[in-house]
Amino acid sequence: MTRITGEPTGTATVTPPSRARRPRRRRNWRGLLFVAPAAVYVAATVVYPLLYNVTQSFFDVGMREVTRGGAAFVGLDNYADQFGRPQFWHSLRVSLVYAFGTVALTFLLGLGLALIFRRAYRGRNILRAVILVAWVLPTVVSANVWRWLLDGSYGLLNAVLSALGLIDGDVFWLGQPTTAVIAVILATAWSFGPLAMILLSAGMEGISPTLYEAARIDGASPWQQFRRLTLPLLRPVSLTAILLIFIFTFKTFDTIFLMTGGGPGGATETLPVYAYNEAFAFSRFDTAAVATVVLMVVPIVLSLVYFRAIRSEERA
């Protein structure tokens, strides 16, 4: 196909097809050059570490193999070894309890805060900014704050409960299995609550006020408006918030390690803490790689289920 271009003088020239395609090819190569730095960065910092970790799970890797090399290929033996350990399943169970408990508490906290800040009133923005501090604080700070609050000897919680006459003597909340699990769930939900509030507030802003006005005209109570309008229309945003919080929580290591170190007696030893101990306490890098592969697979499976559900809703 040929292209005829006009000149200001009114004369016409015929451009050969090969010359017309060359600028387009040059533009494509320029686009790839712009994308190349980002692709190299992602490959070096994300793809390579993940593939290396998965590869390590199929080799016998200890401290000697890390320093000298020569790791032997063992196939699925590391997976068979880990899946046969009660401690591995205990850590996975603790991780799921911790993740689901934190997600439920965080979602309820974020939903309550979003409802509180939904209406405009004096000081709302200042109060919202103060609450966001819990999210922006470094984990080492927030974890140590919670350790101080729950300390058995000089913690604030014991001081308040003693003043009210509810306890007699020191209670070591982080030294008992049940209260330690509840404590790490509370600390994590306190950190992620503002994130859920932001996501759910954005979802509420997208609901048309005319729907609530029509509901009020029909005589719907505030509870009926919340149950029949707010919750159903927030469903896509809620699913996104729940998935994000679950992924963040399931891989959380620092909060638990700083507060309890996985104790007492392994009560708060989640899968990330278990993998850390396998790698850096016992120098078993191969079994630690197996634990981190499982740690990676669970959120990926949930993400695939989530995207499939969203796609089904869009087709319906």
Image (tube, rainbow, N blue to C red):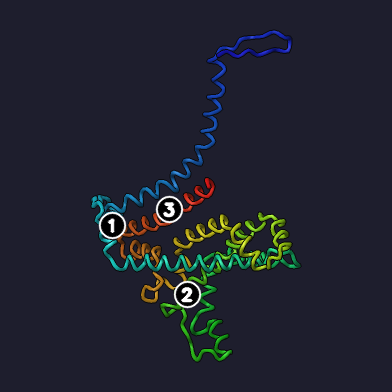
Q: Earlier in the sequence, mark 3 or mark 1?
A: 1
Left or right of 195 in this view: 212: right
- Residue at the extreme front: 218
Residue with the mark numbered 1: 79
Height in image: 289 above or below 88? above
Residue with the mark numbered 3: 300
Identify the mark at residue 118; answer none if there is no mark. none
Which residue is pictured at 74% across the width and 67% down the height? Answer: 123
The amino acid beneath tag 1 is: Tyr
The amino acid beneath tag 2 is: Ile
Height in image: 202 above or below 150? above
Q: Disc 2 and disc 3: Cα gap in Å?
A: 26 Å
Residue with the mark numbered 2: 182
Which residue is pictured at 52% across the width and 71% down the height? Answer: 187
Question: Is any part of residue 277 visible from this angle?
Answer: yes
- Label 3 environment density (alpha carbons within 10 Å; few <14, some 14–19, many ≥20): few
- Label 1 environment density (alpha carbons within 10 Å; few <14, some 14–19, many ≥20): some
Residue 115 in percent (x, y) is at: 65, 66
Q: Earlier in the sequence, mark 2 or mark 1?
A: 1
Q: Disc 3 and disc 1: Cα gap in Å?
A: 19 Å
SS category of the residue bearing label 1: helix
Q: Looking at the image, which is closer to me, 50 or 113? A: 113
Residue 272 in percent (x, y) is at: 40, 63
The amino acid beneath tag 3 is: Ile
Q: Looking at the image, which is closer to me, 310 or 199? A: 310
Q: Disc 2 and disc 1: Cα gap in Å?
A: 31 Å
Which residue is pictured at 43% across the width and 45% down the height? Answer: 44
- Residue at the extreme right: 122
SS category of the residue bearing label 3: helix
Left or right of 293 in this view: 19: right
Determine whether label 2 and label 3 are within 8 Å by CB.
no
